[in-house]
Amino acid sequence: MLKKSTSKRLVDYLSYILLILTGIVVILPFVWMILSSFKTAGEIWTFPPVFMPKKFQWSNYVEAWKALPFDRFFINSLLVTIFVTVGQLFTCSLGGYAFARLRFPGKDKLFLMYLATMMIPFPVLMIPLFIIMQSFGWIDTLKSIIVPGLFSAWGTFLMRQFMMGIPRTLEDAAKIDGCSYWRLYWKIIVPLCKPVFATLGIFTFMGTWNQFFWPLIMINTISNKTLPLGLVMFQTRIAAETPWHLIMAASCATVLPIIILFIIGQKYYVKGIVTSGLKG
Amino acid sequence: MKLMHFRLKNVQKEKIAGYGFLSPNLIGFIIFSLIPIIASIFLTFSRWNLASSPEFVGLQNFSNLLKDELFWRYLWNTFYYAIGTIPLTVILAFFLAYLLNRKIRGVVFFRTLYFLPSVTLLVAIAIVWSWLYNADFGLFNFFLGKLGITGPRWLQSKTWAMPAIIIMGIWKGVGYSMLIFLAGLQTIPEQYYEAAEIDGANWWHRIIHITIPLISPTTFFVIVTTTIGSIQGFDQFYIMTRGGPSGATTTLVYYIFQNAFEWFKMGYAATVAMMLFVIVLALTLLQWRLSNKWVFDMGVN
Amino acid sequence: MIRRDFLKRLGQLGLGAYGMSFLRFCEKASKSISNEILPFDVKFPATDWTMGIVDPQISGTFKIMSWESAFQFEKWNLIINEFFRTYYPNIKVQLDWGISFANYNTKLPVLLAGGSPPDMIWMHDTRAKSFAAIDLLQELDPFLEFFKPDGWPDEYYPTQVESFKYSNKQYAFPYDYATGGLYINLDMYEKIDEELPTEDWTFDDLLRVGKKLTKGDRQFGLNLGSEASAGNQYWILRSFGGDWFNENLTESKFNLPETIEAYQWMTDLRWKHKVAPVPEITQGRPQPFVDGVVAINADLGAPAFGDLLEDKFNWTIAPSPKGPKGRFQFIGGSALSIPLKATHKHIAYELIRYILSKPENLEIIGKKGRMFVSRMSAYEYGLPQGRLAQKMKNYKKVFYDLARRDGVVVPYISKYQEWDDIYRRNMEMLYFGEELSAKKVCLKLHDATNRFLERTYLKKV
């Protein structure tokens, strides 16, 4: 075994110091939010503000959960997010593969069009999209959030870029063996792309989990609302009356599933998948 | 002759496969993106107050736009925010990803830590940021004060409100880009590094000669998407400053929103959106052209 | 059916903009709904609260959209469910509430424009005219005539009735209102040798006391709010004799010396006399008074504020001051409306009438709500109860009697949101202290307002 050189160890130490220092800065607002979720309504606004709550009010979480049907919101959010995430992984990886590897007429133009759609600000698309949903009779259904979410120019773009980065040699070998494109995609590309799948999975999950504007427009019944819509149900017209301690608590609880998923997703961020693939 | 036939058949097969693979995606793309976009393109030639039918006005919206002092001001604000956030986000994200791609202890912990800002809902975290930025008791000015600097009035100042939102934007966006870089770094074969190490290349050389070129498709992706993302930023302005003070943090997407849903000028909103689209598209095409020079395509080589 | 509707909509959006003939067709289609003469044929037995026009056995979905939040919607829920249980048992009620105010005002236009309007909506005085002006709301007068609510309109708060009129037609039925007054921190006030403010106090009296109550940058004597929020400060402007524009909306009045004087006074409060907290202090904290940072604070009359204060310090309320040109008191409020393209308009009207003129319901709304209900005879339900009543002894005088005498209707014009953006951009210069001369800012705003009025209101005439 090679012994780590001093210069290498120095780099390690340096990285640690850098990581910890930036980590503190990055985490601070977040920690403040968590601490605020344990404060009383009055404590949040004390002047000047205090960092630590006098006494940890665990009851905020219970109170927030009881005040609104958060179990329902949670189930709705989970349903929407799972469908969208799985769907996007499928459609985007297929589309990305086509754009990255296959030659067909109009490919570049189509791809540019995909890119272009990402650049149109959403507010102007909202009403046309609403009318489309209405014609499908999907208003106030979870379908209206799920189905448009199944397709994503962003995800297709992401997949394409990563697949472009994978060496072609493996496929060429398989192609000579007479492998179909589907098998190429399924047996070679998909296993090589695990980190990208994990990335897109995390992003889509997160984006859908936190999606606010579109569900706000589409959903009209309390029992169909998702978590972010539930959070703002605490906001009153007169700002002073808003129970911010409950909003903070509910926000912290909302973030939790994403963090768990993120940590699980880390499993797929293992180096050497490509290497082993190449050797095999 | 037989070989030719074989090739032709292959080309044909590849075409069919290409459309086949794309089709599930394409159908959704046409219904949920293209049609609404075409509708809004038509709206740019009309006046529509959301209530009566749209009224055809030709190019009037465009001529109004050219004369609209606010449009140009907010275009500048939009660029200001984009230029402020993009380079820093990309560079920071790359280095964080590089550091976190090493086999060091607690790597999952650090990755989670940097990713946290991206997952939090803005509604709650915006309040915390407004505390941090408070000129009177905020943490920023507290630390600046320790360094002997009188901190600015951040969100209350026409000069500093935008930088304040830029800092917050970087904070929120860096974890996002970091994760993409991280995934990109995974796809670089280990052998390349090993070979370089045997050749005696130090870590800096390895970054410059292996990592950066090989990760360039990812970098291209990160640059294009952060550009688009920052130009379309809305929530941070809407929640933190409502576009103030005196329009200093009003960006074009905010202006589009105001026109559409507060002033009921849908046609004009669509026009501003289309102008913004043309600008972003031009920028992306430029990046695209340039990318041919620096983006390394494994598939081609 | 669904597909036809889809194509029609697409046409309206896309091709409609191109082909004038097609566009005309669309226009006809939408006209036929908007100008429809409402049928008032009584076919079923009427009750106290239903007209007998709609079959009591009717089934379907009745959609309601409200901005009321988690802990405040309950009262409406009670009343609405009771109504449908009694009079239309087969109707399914779809309640969409807990949409915060800003989001509500985004969602509503999309639903109305997209052609999926709710049957009954919440409406704010700042927005009512802008919706009415583009024909999105049902005119209520035919209903009010056919099935008059008890005491309408004389027993309803006149400023509120007025606020929801456009071109002399009623577009919404007011349900509550709040007026402005002063909240006073007695712990601080007792340390200075002064009487409590009365309605005869002038702005300068208040300034004098405010100076005594100010201690560096930790205790501010007097906070009257931000001049960047137009509607809330209108009463100050009028007290000085200033105004926004003339009645015909042909010219701005921001060049009047009285207008400029009013704004200079507000600005000086903050930047010259330093008795009002600068925006840094109030940013990110909705209630500086509750935090004990401000000694005298102008705010809305709502018993709810009392709840927020708990027992942090002794406090009381007092009337807002009068200016050189008289005494004006802020009034703002909310109402219920029916979208023009709603499905169940008759039921919606019956429901609104039921909610807002049945005495038992007014009691629920008043007591569980945060403000006075708009029916004057029911004012007592809006008064603070129990312990709070002790603290706010002169509540009725400050927030009810004086408001009735001096309440001022804020001229929220039909393009108010658009003008407010111009106003805010200019006035934020003063509020954030980027500019200290009110004259400079007002004259700039004067020109901008005139340009706005010309392009918005003159062209059409």
Image (cartoon, helix red, strand yellow):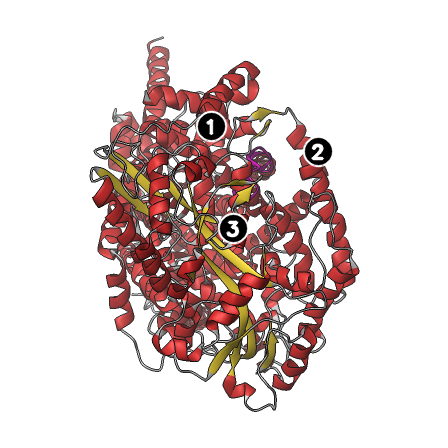
Is disc 2 placed on a helix, strand or loop? loop
Whether marks 2 and 1 lie on the same chain: yes
Residue A268 among those drawn in magenta: no
Q: Are marks 1 and 3 in contact (CB under 8 Å)?
A: no
- Looking at numbered disc 2 in the image, what kind of residue is underneath it? Lys
The picture quadrant where one finds residue C297 is bottom right
Q: Which residues are magenta?
A: B260-272
Mark 3 burial class by Cα count in 10 Å: few <14, some 14-19, many 20+: many
Residue at 33% from the left image edge and 30% from the top image edge: A172
In the rendered view, would you say A87 is above or below A234? above
Residue C157: x and y in percent read 49, 55
Which residue position holds label 3?
A: C125
Whether residue B195 is visible: no
Residue at 37% from the left image edge and 50% from the top image edge: C357
Which residue position holds label 1?
A: C34
Q: Earlier in the sequence, mark 2 or mark 1?
A: 1
Mark 2 burial class by Cα count in 10 Å: few <14, some 14-19, many 20+: few
- Looking at numbered disc 1 in the image, what kind of residue is underneath it? Ser
Mark 1 burial class by Cα count in 10 Å: few <14, some 14-19, many 20+: some
Is disc 3 placed on a helix, strand or loop? loop
Residue A53: x and y in percent read 36, 79
Which quarter of the figure is the C terminus of chain C placed in?
A: top right
| Picture disc at residue C459 | 2
